[in-house]
Amino acid sequence: MGEANITPVLMPKWGLSMREGILVEWLVDEGAEIAVGDEIMEVETDKIASAVEAADAGILRRRVGAAGETYPVRALLGVLAPEDVSDDAIDAYIAAYEVPADEGGDEDSASQYEFVDTAAGRLRYARRGDDGPALVLIHGFGGDLDNWLFNIDALAQQARVFALDLPGHGQSTKQLGDPSLAGLAGVLQAFLDAVEIDRAHLVGHSMGAAVAARLACDAPDRVLSLSLIGAAGLGPEINADYIDGFVDAESRRELKPVLLNLFADSELVSRSMVDDLLKYKRIDGVHEALQQLAASLFADGKQQNLLGTEIAELSIPTLVIWGAEDRVIPAAHAQNAGAARIEQIDGAGHMVQMEQASRVNALILEHVLG
Amino acid sequence: MARKLSMKDAINEALDQEMARDPAVIVMGEDIVGGSGSPGEADAWGGVLGVTKGLYAKHGDRLMDTPLSESAYIGAAIGASTCGLRPVAELMFLDFMGVCFDQIFNQAAKFRYMFGGKAETPVTIRAMVGAGFRAAAQHSQMLTPIFTHIPGLKVVCPSNAYDAKGLLIQSIRDNDPVIFCEHKNLYAHESDVPEESYTVPFGEANIVREGTDATIVAYGLMVHRASEAAEALAKDGIQCEIVDLRTLSPIDIDTVVESVENTGRLICVDEANPRCSIAADVAATVAQEAFGSLKAAPQLVTAPHTPVPFSPALEDLYIPSAERVVEAVRKTMAP
């Protein structure tokens, strides 16, 4: 594909299980000048729908993908090129483009996860990127490493990214051991030891943010920076109906209304998202683990661990990100960490890293790379 | 971690994990270990289609080959369940249940009620159901409605490997008698199944596909026929919602009614004979609960009121096909 100044626009890959996506619609016309981060098209998978933001700048010379059609991951959907590239060259580029084979080339996406045995039990994690500082992503209560599906690859462009499943979550051990925040911070430290990370930038969401902050207080020499997203641990209030509802829901009908609390855009709560969470909640030991965590961290409908003052006294650079429409933890808590930088993002709820992924990715990279 | 597993292997894994977890779980049935006494692997059938293969090596005498007397060993399993064990009895073909109806209908199903709630009967009876196996009239029936008619019995019929494992573990842990129906033509069907133990709750239907134009209610193999039909209809812009009942007693009629309130159309697909079938039951209940939402008469797609034919050509005609489901959906859409 000779033309060095032609840049392809591809079907993105969100999460390890994604094989194909539907190009729902184009958000820009042919001939438009595109800047990095512009929303250029809407893509939908069986799990989630989201706008795709441009990874490269340029003029959209050709829309190759048609709205409403399904394409495999990394299929050519559009072509960016300067005006001086001829139409013939673009036609030749399109004709010559081949969808690259999946790395590993097999159907078994599970092999792309890794497992590591720690003192806290067997933990699952994903690892992306070869160069740059170590960045560790810690999901929230009831979540798993796939909560970062819109973040992990973008962050891995400039960092070595690790995302783990905390105990009781995802495909890690369902035995919690110590369900206190200090216990979870201990697991995180054991994970850093096991994957041989000396010092890391910690990015935590919700309960995961409190875990990251706890570790920063307990072992500040292991933590280069904190990025706290929709964080627990910064104020007493939490939506107790959400926590209780999530723990107790046994059916699709019970769980779906609970999950609506997580997003500003309720359309994002798909049948597949509800089904996947039900499948997780049905596994032996999960209900008990969630009950123990809720009883330990959110007893009586209040957050039991307030770390704001402690974090403020650390000399660790701290970024706080919050969705303006967070209905699980109030966005006002952002003020309580003494953070140098607080970013409130409109049009996003508690899962701000999914709803406004590229904004969150840019903020994290800016914070981490300085 | 989830990986692809056939329904047969998922059932085997459920039995294996529950036997490892709970020493009260025993498994009994005809040829489920080996049978006749010839030496070594040659004898280790693991049941007529090999579903229990390999379990004897792990759990030894907690698996028992029984005499060819269903009335004797189903009775023994029920008795053992009232005395602290959690037996899983394999009855081979549900068609053979006739000779042990007293033990099931009049004993197991009644103990909790007759003894004022003080007796529990945690027995699971596994049996193959359904046609398409060229096994003729006495080994091919879908007799689910006979069991749903009896209060005190729980009746399960999974459509895929994930549900089969979770529902079987739930059945074994349940304190009431469960009739667990395994469609023989789904044993090879694969889906993602977690390695860990998990339960799928009773009375919780699964929405296999979302749609706004018509609701197709099915269970077992018929879920797949409904999916084929929905796929074909989607090409013409007709969006079907498919409700997989998963358990027939208890039955999740709320999910069905909720769906019909959105779509206004109901098609019930059932491999059983039509009279007093699950299809008839669902249609009647929806007519009563959601009559005002219906835009057309509910349609029933079932086997005819005949025995299952031995002729392959006739047997294929006997089982409801995707084409018949498509026709039924179109009938509800006609002006």
Image: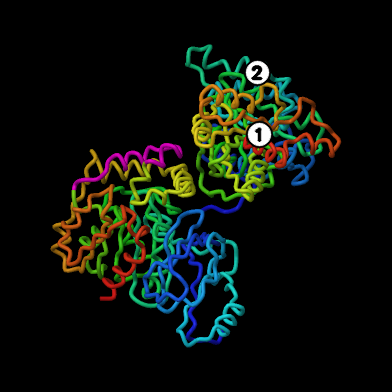
Comes first in the chain, label 1 or label 2:
2
**Residue drawn 23% across and 63% down?**
A343
From the viewer's perspective, is A147 left or right of B206? left
Q: Which residue is labeled 1 in the image?
A: B269
Chain to which the residue tagged by mark 1 belongs: B
Labels in figure, total: 2
Q: Of residues A325 and A152, which is closer to you in this image?
A: A325
Residue B165 in the image, given as x and y percentages of width and height: 57, 41
Kindly state the secondary structure of the residue where label 2 is placed. helix
**Residue drawn 46% across and 62% down?**
A14
In this picture, which residue range is highlighted in magenta? A236-257
Q: Residue furthest front?
A: B335
In the displayed structure, would residue A242 be above or below residue A195? above
Q: Can the viewer see residue B136?
A: yes
Q: Quadrant of the C terminus of chain A?
A: bottom left
Q: Of residues B325 and A341, which is closer to you in this image?
A: B325
Mark 1 and mark 2 on one chain: yes
Q: Mark 1 or mark 2, which is nearer to you? A: 1
Mark 1 Cα within 10 Å, few/some/many (few <14, many 20+)?
many
Residue A129 in the image, given as x and y percentages of width and height: 42, 73
Q: Type of residue at label 2?
A: Gln
Q: Quadrant of residue B219?
A: top right
Q: Quadrant of residue B93?
A: top right
Kindly state the secondary structure of the residue where label 1 is placed. strand
Q: Can the viewer see residue B123?
A: no
Residue B103 image label: 2
